[in-house]
Structure formats: C-alpha cells, structure tokens
Image (spheres, grey):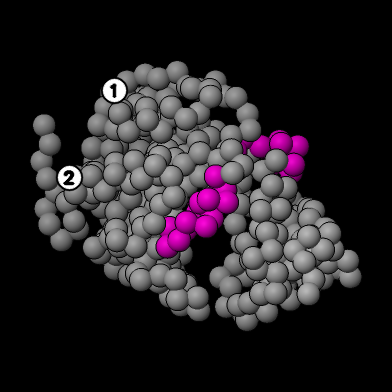
Amino acid sequence: MESDQQKHEDLDVDIFCPHDAEEIAALFRSIYGEEYPVRLVYNPAELIAAFERRENIPIVARTKDGRIVAHEALYRSSPNPKVYEAGQGLVALEWRGSGVNARINHHILNTLAPGLDIDAVFGEAVCNHVYMQKGWGKFGTIETGIEVDLMPQEAYAAEGSATGRVATLFMFRNYRERKQIVHLPGIYRDQLEFIYSAFPDLPEFKAGRGSLPLEPSRMETQIFDFAKVARMTIKSPGADFEAVLADRQKVLVNQGIVVLQAWLNLSWPFINKVIEILRKHGYFFGGLLPAWFGTDGLLMQKIMEQPNWEGINLYSDRAKEILAFVRADWSRVGSPSSPPKQYL
C-alpha cells in the first residue's frame, strides 16, 4: 500500500496554470456532479479569464501525470479588491485524509499571499465541525466574527454533517500594516477591543458620534438564492437610511430570504446611529472585518428564524468568546417575531 509520504512526493502544489482548467472541472464533477453553486469552476475559458484578471486565483495539487486531485481558490468577495477570500476547497475521495489540504493552506497563506499585493486573506470556516478551524488556525489566522446560519442544511446532505443551518467563523490574516481611524460604536466597544487585541497593529480608536449625512442612502445587495442569504453593503447611509433599510428588508423577506447581513464601515464617525437603526430592526453583532473597505468593517446580521445555536461547534476559546458576544446581542435585540427591546 502506498504510504502518505509517497503520496505527498507524488504531488505538486502550486498556483493555477491554464491547462489545469479542464481538470478542475473534472474534479468538481467527480464530487458534485453539475450541482456546485460556483459555476465558474465548470467553464475553463471563464476560469482562465478570471485568473488573468486576478479575480479568482486557484491553487491546485497535481499528480505527476497532471491530474488535479485537490483545489482551493483565492477570490474577491469584499468591496476592497485587495482582500481575498479563500474557499471552493475540495479533495478527490482517494486523497482525503492525506494532509493535502494542509499543504494547500500552507501554500496559500505562507507562500502565495505574501508575494501578492493584498491587504488580507480570510476564510469562512464552517461550524458544523471544527476541522477547518483547526487547520486554518495553524497558519496565523485570527478569528474575528461569526456568521449565524449562513449555509442551509441541504448543502451538507451528502455527508450528513449538519443538523440545521450552518454558521461560519471568520478567520483573517493581514499582510499589510495600515494606518486608519476606527470609530468604535459605544455599544460594541468592549467586544471590538477584545477582537482587536489579537492583532499586532492597532488602528487609532475614536468614539463614534454625530448624526447621519443629509444625502440619500446608497447600498448594494447581493442575493444567494440557494442559501436564502442577502448581503447588503451599506455604501453610504444618509438621513433616509431607516426607510431605505425597511423597504429593502421587506422585499428580501418576501423573496424568502432568511439571513440578512449588513456590512458597515468603521471609518464612519456616525457609526453609532447606523447601528442604533439596525438594532431597532432586529440586527445583532456579527464581528470585525479587517480591511473590508480598505478601512475595517463591521458585520451586523438578522435571522428570520430561530438560529441553530446548538449546531455551532467551535475549536478555540477565542471563537467561543466571540460567539458569546453574538448570542448575547441577539437575545437583547429580540427575535424577528417579537418587538425589539428598548435600551437606555
């Protein structure tokens, strides 16, 4: 029987080459058929074009005969083009348990990313188990937030590893020191200071204050139909923010969305007012998003059903502390079916 050491010697882990595109499609079909939601992986021409634009940078493990047996990609998913998400990971069945995932993560976080012109790399580690959390934790990543109920249980039906919707844990690694001013919202000051405490370079902290600007609000919404998730990037909140939020939320809920996320910029002096409005409408603390807008961001979230708290499995004490922040704020805000609680 071939040893793991021999298997490792037979693999080359490296960045994507155009001739890998057909093999990547074949790997995804071998695991998911035609059902993987990121359609890019099935289209070699689009995959090559996205790589040339540096929108999507695959990292692959190749056998000596050129077969792709594992894949993960860096791709842009935040408003800052210099922040990349790591995801789309999968391993051929016969290579699972061989340690190839660790080799790919090492290559991404310790070899590839430091040589790119980027601010940060992050992953959304699923919380129906702790394997990705443990794996990523070995490479200098820092836990910064929790996305409650992000993924539907159906996404894990084949492996039977979920008992309800699945949360994810934000794990970031920064690659550049940045000078920035962060306006700490008073209600989350302690929580954010705890999250920031793990980072070597801290921003200049100022207290949030002031009223919303007079100009009309602008926000962009991205909808993930399969997951029933909507992500609202608040570009610039104005005096009409509460009305705009209520209208947008009504439309999304009528479309069957059950997870609503709002992405806020911590450089806003008026951050307190934005959070006050969101909490009034049932949104609660999610966590810190380093470099999300160039400056740091904050996740607020609302779940239209009872969250699957019991299904959240966390590896580190730090992640468990962040979950305590998130759950406590959810309990203070009130569930969607009950009126929001009043605050001093």
- Residue 253 against residue 314 in the figure, above or below: below
Residue under label 2, please give it: 332
In the picture, which quadrant includes the C terminus?
Answer: top left
Provide residue 73's location: percent of width, then percent of height. 67, 56
Q: Amino acid at mark 2?
A: Arg
- Count of marks, rendered view: 2
Which residue reaches farthest right?
A: 65
The residue located at (29%, 61%) in the rendering is 310
Residue 93 in the image: state x and y as whole percent.
66, 74
* Viewer-nearest residue: 132 or 152: 132
Q: Is residue 83 left or right of residue 186?
A: right
- First to last magenta residue range: 111-137
Q: Earlier in the sequence, mark 1 or mark 2?
A: 1
Residue in the image at 32% along x and 20% along y: 207
Badge 1 is on which residue? 209
Q: Helix or strand or loop: what does disc 2 sit on?
A: helix
